[in-house]
Amino acid sequence: MKKQLILSSFLTSSILLFSGCSTTTNNIINDFQQKINHISFNKKLKKNKNLPIPFDLKYISSETSISLEWMFENKEQINGFNIYRAEEGNNKLLLIDRINNKHTTHFVDNNLKPNTKYTYIITSYNDTYESDNSPLLNAQTYNTLPPINYLKASNNLVNMIKIVWRPDLNPNVKGYIIEKQVDKKWIDLATIENKLIVEYFDKNLKHNELAKYRISKLSMENQKSKPSPIIIGSTKPLPHIVENIRTTFNLPNKISLSWTSNREEDIVFYNLYKKSDIPLIGNLKKEFITKTSDTYYHFPTIKDGQKETFYITAVNKEGLESNFQPEGILGKSLDKPGSPSFISKTIQNGKINFSWNKGDNRNIGYIIKKVINNIEKEIILDINFFEDSNISKGQTISYTIIGFDDNGIQSLPSDKITFEVK
């Protein structure tokens, strides 16, 4: 009596475990049932109608597993149970497992296809025989998780792309798998094993780099949903190259530069460089001059007619610097004026006379350099004729002329003339 009570209690608990689950022939799908009627069974043992038959089959399922439950009596006559299974579209029930435990009433069938119909029967067996078939049980695995339908990728971050998506609070969702297209192939970029995390940063990218992404949900059984729609993200590009650079060629002692303000609103200053004969910035032959928030700069020169090649870059608030101009922009300070040249020279009546042409229309005055016995004296004139009566017999006197313009820029000296005073 006590043994009967224990068995009764166990059967009751087993029934309650799968209560509310799909049952046997009451829930069989009609069209699939017609196919099952013609299934040929894979017999491993001879049939014995006297062996007890499992009954009241039920199941619960997930994406890739189906858990079976059944009822049974008179366990003393058997060794265990045979589990047979057929997949929809197959015409044969195959033995998938033999359970060598006559007390078990549960079995989990793993590694199944999502959203797929299966049919099961269970038989009992002993050393020689197996029972007739249990009632058919139609079961079905869950559909795969629906794909993520909302996600975005950034296009304005420096050397990184931020991906955000809407979380799925489905209890079967474990996390997410982020994929990236590389060389036209999808690779796993990251696995997020927390379904409440809804952002990811793809870092260490190049400037203005485009990338395609998609995300799949990851179930508790590590099954992937269909991927989301593809999204495209990009990193922030470098500022546009500085354009319309203008330089001067005719200003004394300087070269003036001006350029068009960059179109980006986040430009904070401009860097100015000039070409160098030796590498100064990495392997680039460029020398940093200064930075300015203006769109003009006056570069002071040391020499008259000094030539320089300039480069200007724009720098934004995040420190991104635009590329250099490919060839640079040439500028030049004002050249020296042309040198005067003698056109006549005489010595008579104790006086030296000579005249010269201007050499350059810029010349507004002249410096006469008179040398006697290595002693130099300068005379400044605003005419192009000179008479020197301060001479003595026996002297050797030489003269050169330097012109100068209204900026004070001096020409190179003229040719030298020499007089022997007798």
Image (cartoon, helix red, strand yellow):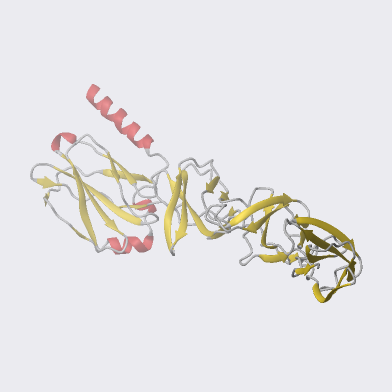
Q: Quadrant of the N terminus?
A: top left
Identified at 44% across, 60% down, the residue is 182
117 or 400, which lies in front?
400
50 or 317, which lies in front?
317
Residue 275 in sight from this viewpoint: yes
365 or 216, which lies in front?
365
Q: Is residue 352 above or below residue 319?
A: below
Q: Quadrant of the C terminus?
A: bottom right
Seen as rendered, the residue at the extreme top is 2
* Residue 307 image position (x, y, % from top left): 69, 64
* Residue 152 image position (x, y, % from top left): 59, 54
Q: Is residue 110 above or below residue 117?
A: above
Side (left or right) of 158 relative to 202: right
Side (left or right) of 66 relative to 309: left
* Residue 189 image position (x, y, % from top left): 45, 51
Residue 143 in sight from this viewpoint: no
**Callout count:** 0
